[in-house]
């Protein structure tokens, strides 16, 4: 779909649609806010009755978005059936560890042909499954899409300029998500590489932890740039081995999401890396944030998968050695710098040596 086909119409020209958002965390809250302000009828599902009560009475979600008011027609609920019943699109922002169990528990609540879009950037341990694959397995009658890109939730709720990508095989899914989410501060681009877009969104969390450590150690701007570009090479090498389109990693879901999460202290994964780089224990760093840092779980899965497939991923291996093997950060950096030097850009020169 060309750029000119993206939805840029004002909310005044849009018809009202019933939509559902599943998951009361930071990104689910951000998407509910966008949809509410775009004048849609939003049914916002979450497990916590206290969250439902707070949003009902005060229009706030203080645990995840303190100080942010949810405007528009947003109905919080603990009843997933009522949320998704009749919804034209269901946006799923449930953490990856609970994703399948929630969908499976409520599989009969989804209707034939309903559009279901994953907002979750993670991987399921069993079978190395992405969230779109879980949706396809559990509710094959639905039309599946994935939303990803450089999307710090705190900036979206502040109406800072943001661009995202909707990936789906079905052109109707792409155009409908563009129509519902597009506004004067949120631009929605399209892609057909569902697997690549989704895998990029999961992988970048690992490298945000690495970049947080580099910032804590004050390694310098040259080093930070090196880490980001080598991260891009590493994640795209891995993803293409699994069937993704390499060009996807040149877009918002790849380099765009990687840059924002590797440079911003607003990123949870970056903050975990920064804390560890300053000497904190991993468990203490995660507890301090108080929210899920998906990169911690993704690291374990990707290391296992890359070794199984024989894919060279020195940053993944090095981070694993630091977090779980007791290796010092400086020792790992030293080993990376002394490794054999190879090609700069993936897929241009043949890989004949380990880099």
Image (cartoon, rainbow, N blue to C red):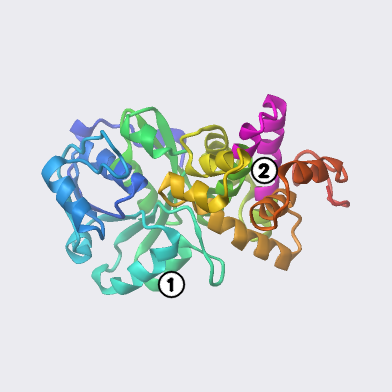
Tell me the SS state at disc 2. helix
In the rendered image, which residue does mark 2 sit on? 231
User: Which region is colored magenta?
Assistant: 212-235
In the rendered image, which residue does mark 1 sit on? 137
Q: Residues within 10 Å of mark 1 (few under 14, many from 20)?
A: few
Where, by quadrant of the figure, is residue 48 drawn? Answer: bottom left
Point out the tag, 1 or 2, that comes first from the N-terminus: 1
Q: Tell me if I can see residue 146 in this picture.
A: yes
The residue lying at 18 percent from left, 46 percent from top is 55
Q: Residues within 10 Å of mark 2 (few under 14, many from 20)?
A: many
Q: Is residue 197 left or right of residue 89?
A: right
Q: Tell me if I can see residue 135 in this picture.
A: no
Q: Residue furthest top?
A: 221
Give the alpha-carbon distance from disc 1 to disc 2, as whole Å. 31 Å
Q: Is residue 96 left or right of residue 14?
A: right
Q: Nearer the viewer, residue 305 or 321?
A: 321
Q: Main secondary structure of the magenta part?
A: helix
Badges 1 and 2: C-beta atoms under 8 Å apart?
A: no
The residue lying at 17 percent from left, 44 percent from top is 16
């Amino acid at each position: 779909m060309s750029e000119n086909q993206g939805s840029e119409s004002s909310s005044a020209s849009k018809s009202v649609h019933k939509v559902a958002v599943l998951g009361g965390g930071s990104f689910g809250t951000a998407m509910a806010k966008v949809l509410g302000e775009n004048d849609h009828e939003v049914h916002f599902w979450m497990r916590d009755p206290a969250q439902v009560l707070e949003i009902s009475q005060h229009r706030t979600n203080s645990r995840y978005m303190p100080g942010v008011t949810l405007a528009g027609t947003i109905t919080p609920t603990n009843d997933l059936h009522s949320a998704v019943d009749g919804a034209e699109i269901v946006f799923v922002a449930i953490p990856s560890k609970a994703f399948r169990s929630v969908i499976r528990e409520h599989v009969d609540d989804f209707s034939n042909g309903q559009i279901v879009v994953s907002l979750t950037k993670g991987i399921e341990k069993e079978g190395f499954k992405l969230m779109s694959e879980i949706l396809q397995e559990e509710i094959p009658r639905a039309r599946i899409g994935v939303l990803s890109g450089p999307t710090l939730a705190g900036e979206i709720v502040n109406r800072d300029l943001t661009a995202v990508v909707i990936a789906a095989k079905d052109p109707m899914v792409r155009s409908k998500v563009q129509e519902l989410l597009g506004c004067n501060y949120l631009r929605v681009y399209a892609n057909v590489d569902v697997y690549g877009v989704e895998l990029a969104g999961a992988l970048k969390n690992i490298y945000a932890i690495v970049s947080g450590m580099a910032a804590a150690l004050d390694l310098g701007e040259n080093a930070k740039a090196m880490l980001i570009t080598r991260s891009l090479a590493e994640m795209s090498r891995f993803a293409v081995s699994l069937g993704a389109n390499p060009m996807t990693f040149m877009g918002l879901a790849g380099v765009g999401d990687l840059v924002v999460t590797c440079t911003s202290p607003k990123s949870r994964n970056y903050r975990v890396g920064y804390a560890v780089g300053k000497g904190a224990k991993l468990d203490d760093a995660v507890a301090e944030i108080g929210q899920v840092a998906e990169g911690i779980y993704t690291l374990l899965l990707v290391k296992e998968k890359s070794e199984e497939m024989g894919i060279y991923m020195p940053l993944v291996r090095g981070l694993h050695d630091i977090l779980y093997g007791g290796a010092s950060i400086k020792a790992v950096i030293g080993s990376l710098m002394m490794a054999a030097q190879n090609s700069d850009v993936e897929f241009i020169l043949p890989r004949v040596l380990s880099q």
